[in-house]
Amino acid sequence: MKVLMVEPGFAPYEAEINGLREMQQAVGGRIQAIYPFEEQVGVVCNDEGLINGLPFNRSMPGGYEGVFGNFFVCGLGEEDFCSLTPGQMQKYKKLFHNPEILLRTNRKGLVTLKVEPKIKGKKAAEKRRDTPLGRE
């Protein structure tokens, strides 16, 4: 099935995942599905991400607070997970484009801050270039 893979610090990307073993490999352990959106999509993450000390990834609406470690967004079929539609893929790529870091404050407890994403598979110099070539 075609899913949107979301890793801490990176821009989301499309991936193909088939079967329970590949789902577990993608999230690094036992899977848990949460449903923070009204749309027929699920967020599949590591069931023990927080307990195992995985890095904070993204905040979630619907009272779920946040996800730790890798997760993927997939469609929901009648009885199982399914591929995202092209429209859903674009919608959630945009929603999860910016990684977040989790900060602790004295007054408000925990807050998140959106940061620029790294791009999976690109070298550090290609990820983000603030200065013109030749002036590094």
Image (cartoon, rainbow, N blue to C red):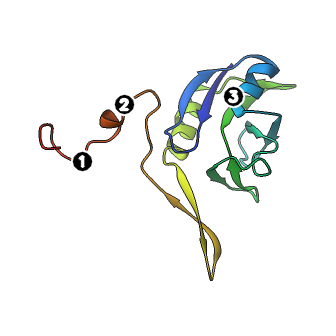
Please name which of the two marks, 3 or 2, marks the residue nearer to the observer.
2
- Total labels drawn: 3
| Lower position in the chain sequence, tag 3 or tag 2 | 3
The secondary structure type at the circle numbered 3 is helix
| Direction from residue 118 to residue 135 in the image, left or right | left
Residue 81 image-quadrant placement: top right
Tell which of 74 and 25 is nearer to you.
25
Query: Which dot marks residue 123?
Result: 2
Q: CA distance from mark 2 to mark 1?
A: 15 Å
Give the amino acid at mark 1.
Answer: Asp
The amino acid on which the numbered mark 3 sits, given as a three-letter code, is Ala
Residue drawn at (63%, 78%), measured in percent from left and top? 108
- The amino acid marked with disc number 2 is Lys
Residue that extends furthest to the left in the rendered view of this protein: 134
Which one is in front, 80 or 66? 66
Residue found 69% across the figure and 48% down from its top: 68
The residue at which mark 1 appears reads as 130
In whole angstroms, how far apart are the C-alphas of marks 3 and 1?
Answer: 32 Å
**Image side of residue 7 versus residue 21, left or right:** left
Q: Residue shown at 60%/31% (left/top)?
A: 4
Which disc, if any, is residue 26? 3
Q: Earlier in the sequence, mark 3 or mark 1?
A: 3
Q: Mark 2, residues whose alpha carbon is within 10 Å: few (<14), some, or many (≥20)?
A: few
Residue 106 lies, with reference to residue 16, above or below; the image says below
Mark 3 vs mark 2, CA separation in Å: 22 Å
Callout 2 touching callout 1 (CB < 8 Å): no
| Percent position of residue 65, x then y | 71, 58
Task: Between residue 107 and residue 60, name the one nearer to us.
Answer: 107
Q: Residue at x 52, y 45 (%)?
A: 9
Q: Nearer the viewer, mark 2 or mark 1?
A: 2
